[in-house]
Every structure is written in C-alpha cells, then in structure tokens.
Amino acid sequence: MSRGLWREKRFFILAFLILGLSPMRDIGFSFGAKRLYAGEFLVEKLVFAPALFYAGEEVEALVVASGTGGDPESFDLTAKSGLPERGSFANPEIKRVSLKKAGDSWEIRYRFVPWTPGPGKLRGFSAKGSLIPGFDYSVEAAVKPGERDLEGPKPQRDPPGTALYLYGFAGFALLFALGIVAAAGWLLPAARALMARRRAAEAYTALEKSLDYLEGEVESVEPKAFCAVFSHALRLYLSARLIDRAEALTPAELAVLAEDRFPVPGLRDEAVSLLRASDTARFSSEGFALERMRDSVRRAREFGSRAEEALDAFL
C-alpha cells in the first residue's frame, strides 16, 4: 500500500469519528443559565404543576424548547404505547410524554411520579427519532426537619380499656379456679361417701344373697359344704365392711382384735362365735345338725343388720 493512499484513509477515518461523536457534545443541561441543551432541542423554559410536589404524587412538567435543526415528528406516548421500557421499579415513573409544535417553539409535556424525596433527575431518551431532553427536579419531604421526632423509641401504648380487660380476665380466671377448688372440696367428700355407701350396699347384698342360698339349700346340702360357703360369705363381708383382710384371719386371731375396731360392742364376739362353729364343723368329724345350720343363717342375718345400722350412723 502506498504512503499517499494510507494517509487518505486515515483522513477519512478521523473525519468519520469527529462527525459521529459531535452530537454527544450537546447532551446535557445548564439550569444555572436557564438555557439547557439536549441534543436537537434548546430548552427555553421548565415549569412544574404543581410547583411543589411530594413523593408518590403525579406531576406534570412542561418544557418549552426551540429546535436546533429540522422539524421533529409530534407524538403522544404513554407507558403502555411507545415509551421506552424502564423496569418495574423506575424512579421517577414516567406515565406520559408528548411533543407538539406551539408557535415558533416546541412543547414537551411529561407526566411522571417521583418516589423518593429530595433531588432527582429525569434522564433524556430517544423517541420517534428525537432526543427528548431530561431535567432535574426536587421532591418536597412530607415531614419537615422541625417536625421530626428525634427522641428514642417510646414504650408501647395499650389501647383504651386494655387494663380493665386484662385484669377482668385474670380476675375471672382466678374466681373460676377458686370455684373449681371449692367444688372439688365439696364434691370429693360427697363422692367418697357415695362410694362408701355403694360398697356397703354391695357387701351387704352379697351376704344376704349367700344366706338366702344357704337357707334354701339347707335341707339338701352337706354340712361341710354348708360351713365352707357360710364361712367364706361371712369373712368377705367382714373384710369389706369391718376389718381389712378378715378373710385371712382365723377365729382365734379375730378374737384378739380390739373391741373398738367394731362399730358396736358384741359384734366381734358374735363374729368369732359364728366362724369358730362353722370352721370346727368343717375341719373335724363333729357333725353340724340342720337346726344349727338354720340358727347360723339367722344369727348371720342379725349380725349383718346390726353392723349396717351402726355403720350408717357413722356415715
């Protein structure tokens, strides 16, 4: 390649770069001089409505500008039709941008929503072949510096009536617990007495049934069998109503028990007499006549009746 041809190429490359980068020098704003340059527009005037606005409030900004060359195409763009995509969390959020001719100038209207207080900037963008200028703005703070409470965290304040509700509920719970205790104190003795009467009734009923059976079978039953059933029935009654584990005691052991362990005097000696007579006939060759068996049944009935009357008096 000749030296002259290489110089010619370098000249064209340099010229292309200068021409391509020259519009970028005009992108920017100079609010201090009130004349802002943004690509194809020379901004003459910037007005906000309302003049003071807060975060989250929709604002309209009017930019009056003169074109620096050519006639751009008028348009009216919204967030859903034509505006560049800025993301879901853009700040500010642009709602609408329109461009129209107004005499010798151009009017650019913005509708946007700033989301943070303090200074902000709406950056310029391209639309319909035109470079739309951006601008700076300032969002008022809803709470002024003098209105801010700089004290530390304060204790939580309860809603009205909270103390009455809490103390009332606590008092009700306490009364309810005391009521349960009082009811238990009254019901437990009553329940014990009821269970005692039930056990007494069951024990006496069992004795009466056994004596009824023996009385009905007295003429046909063998004496030894009669004595075995009679002794067992009487011992069970004694164990349930008078002496613990009386079924394991012999007549001699029963006879040495204190008299005051029985509800009335004479019951101990009567029980010893009945059991000794039946045990003797049961384990010896001595006979047990019919009249003695009938007399044992009669005496056992009287024994049970006297014992129940005395025990009922204690209950």
Image (tube, rainbow, N blue to C red):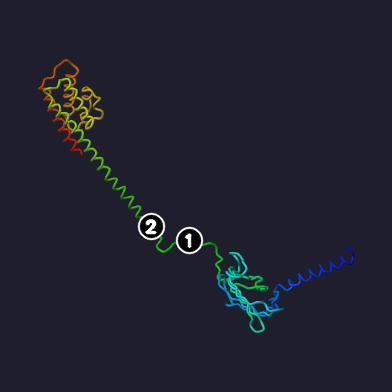
Residue that carries the numbered disc 1 in the rendered image: 156
Q: Residues within 10 Å of mark 1 (few under 14, many from 20)?
A: few
Please name the residue shown 89% across and 67% down the image.
Answer: 4
Q: Quadrant of residue 59?
A: bottom right
Residue 142 position in % (x across, y down): 56, 71
Under circle 1, the secondary element is loop
The residue that appears at 40% across and 60% down in the rendered structure is 163
| The residue positioned farthest toward the right in the image shown | 3
Q: Mark 1 belongs to which amino acid?
A: Gln
Of all residues shown, which one is farthest toward the top?
285
**Is residue 11 left or right of 296 when viewed as pictured?**
right
Identify the mark nearer the N-term, 2 or 1: 1
Q: Is residue 146 left or right of residue 284?
A: right
Q: Quadrant of the N terminus?
A: bottom right
Vertical relation: 250 (above or below) 307: above
Q: Which of the labelled discs sits on residue 167, or is there none? A: 2
How crowded pointer 2 is (Cα within 10 Å; few <14, some 14-19, many 20+) is rated as few
User: Considering only vertical position in the picture, is 87 above or below 100?
Assistant: above
- Judge whether 179 appears above or below 152 on screen: above
Percent position of residue 290, x then y = 10, 21
Residue 65, position in %: x, y? 67, 79
Task: Describe the element under mark 2 as helix, strand or loop.
Answer: helix
* Residue at point 87%, 67% (across, down): 7
* Marker disc for residue 64: none
**Farthest-out residue, bottom:** 103
